[in-house]
Amino acid sequence: MIDFSSDRPVHWQLADIIGADIAAGRVKPGQVLLSETRLMQQWELGRVAVRQALGVLRGEGLVDTVKCEGSYVRRQAPLDRVAVQGPVEVTVRMPSPEERKDLNIPEGVPMFVIKEPRKRSRTLSADRTVLVWAGEDRVASEEH
C-alpha cells in the first residue's frame, strides 16, 4: 500500500512495490508492466509519480521502457566469463551516454573497466560479465 502520510516519496514507494513483485517472481523477465494509466488508477497516483517510479526501476536495472509500448521487466543477459590475470586494475563505473550506446548497456547498469599493463583498457557491461581470476599471483590479503 502507498502511505501518503509517509516521509518516503510516493514514487519511491511504488518503485519498492513493483521491485518487490519482480524480486518475488510475480512479474517475470520480459513481461510487460501495467500501463502508466493503469498504475495511476490502481495506486491513486498522478502520472508524474508513476513515471518517476518507472525511472527509479530503470535506474536500478530492473525494467526497460520502450516508447509507445510500455515498460518490461528486464531479461537477464547471458553471462560472459572474462579471464583476468597478473597486475590488473578493475574499476566499476556508470557508462557515459556514448558508452552506453556503443556497448549496448541498458540504463542503470554499470560497466567494468579493465586496465592491464601495456594493453588497451577494456570496457564490459557488468550485467553480462563475470570476471574470473586466471593467474597464479594472488593479492596478499587473499592468502591470509
Image: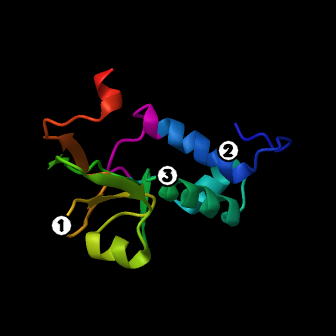
| Helix, strand or loop for disc 3 | loop
Residue 114 appears anywhere in the view: yes
Give the amino acid at mark 1: Arg
Give the amino acid at mark 2: Gln
* Quadrant of image for the C terminus: top left
Q: Which sits in the foreground, 53 or 126?
A: 126
Of the image marks 3 and 1, the number of the one nearer the N terminus: 3
> What is the residue that sits farthest to the bottom in this orientation?
98
Circle 2 Cα neighbour tier, 10 Å, few/some/many (<14 / 14–19 / ≥20) = some
Residue 109 appears anywhere in the view: no
> What is the residue that sits farthest to the top in this orientation?
144
Of the image marks 1 and 2, the number of the one nearer the N terminus: 2
Which residue is under mark 2? 13
Q: Give the residue drawn at x 60%, y 53%.
A: 39
Q: Give the residue drawn at x 31%, y 53%.
A: 89
- Residue 120 location, quadrant: bottom left
Which residue is under mark 1? 118
> Could you say which disc has been placed on residue 2 in the image?
none
Q: Which residues are magenta?
A: 22-31
Which residue is under mark 3? 60
Q: Count numbered badges in the picture.
A: 3
Where residue 77 sits in the image (x, y, percent)?
24, 51
Q: Quote the CA–CA distance across marks 2 and 3.
A: 14 Å
Residue 89 covered by magenta stretch: no
Circle 3 Cα neighbour tier, 10 Å, few/some/many (<14 / 14–19 / ≥20) = some
